[in-house]
Amino acid sequence: SSPEKTAAPVGSMQPVERQRPKRAGAGVPSSSLEVGYKFYALCGLSHASTKDFVAGRFHEVEGLLGRGVYCSLDLESARGAGDKREVVLLRFFPGGEKSPPEGFAGIKVTTTPCSTWREEGFAGCWLPTVCSPIGDGQGELCLRADIISKATKYDPGSWGGGQDRSVEVRQSARTLATGIPQIIERWRYQAGLVQWAGLAIAGGAVIVAGTLVRFSFYGSAAAAGCIALMFGLSSL
């Protein structure tokens, strides 16, 4: 017969299961676990909240993904309906800026609304629009305020409105998209990030550069090559 199990004495120390360190893979982009890897996102705010954020006072609110700072990887979504909200550019380090944060790290990529990511030890949670018809008007990305290092007012179309960081925001979106579990949705989202008009211009410039080389117009060919490179890099 099997030996009987004896109950632990009352008041005795019970073993506590420690949370396992997160591993990169489907649902957790590897770069979001790296110390020093920075991401950019856009946050739509009222005028008063914009002043607070720029001053380093980041307010967490409740929403579809639980409590956190809600932002977006899409400018139009950040602006909201009617372009009534001001937009702030956020720079954040989910893996820590100079050292790993205490007790949390990484961005959880989910395909359904999730509010337990804090308890699971993540620095933020992202619900891509291609994965769920349900969204939050505040944004599809929810972050711990602790991981945000800087906020600047973002309106590159106006005088003094800040440097255009659309390429960096798009790169952040592309990096986070590596954590989308479904490969078709991942490809569809990444394809939507490509600026196809810019790629078309780059392709045309390559053709022009090749033609100029054939006629020994090397200086003009080099200029056309630079244009192709500039549009190509900014479109991906």
Image (tube, helix red, strand yellow):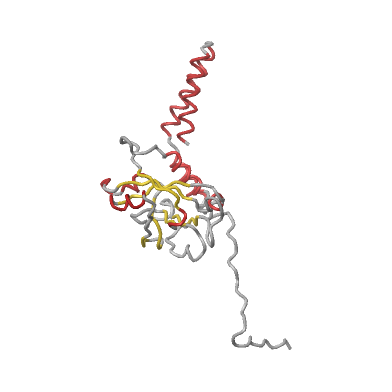
What residue is at 54 percent from the left and 62 percent from the top? Answer: 103
Seen as rendered, the residue at the extreme right is: 1
In the rendering, at what x and y percent does residue 34 appear?
Answer: 56, 51
170 versus 61 height, above or below: above
* Observer-nearest of 184 and 125: 125
107 versus 202 height, above or below: below
Question: Is residue 15 left or right of 150 when viewed as pictured?
Answer: right
Total numbered labels placed on residues in the image: 0
In the rendering, at what x and y percent does residue 229 appear?
Answer: 50, 28
Question: Is residue 33 left or right of 116 when viewed as pictured?
Answer: right
Q: Quadrant of the N terminus?
A: bottom right
* Observer-nearest of 25 and 211: 25
What residue is at 48 percent from the left and 47 percent from the top? Answer: 39
What residue is at 41 percent from the left and 32 percent from the top? Answer: 197
What residue is at 43 percent from the left and 34 percent from the top? Answer: 196
199 versus 76 height, above or below: above
Q: Which quadrant would residue 161 be assigned to in this image?
A: top left
Question: Is residue 57 left or right of 147 when viewed as pictured?
Answer: left
Seen as rendered, the residue at the extreme front is: 55
85 versus 195 height, above or below: below
In the rendering, at what x and y percent does residue 153 appear?
Answer: 35, 44
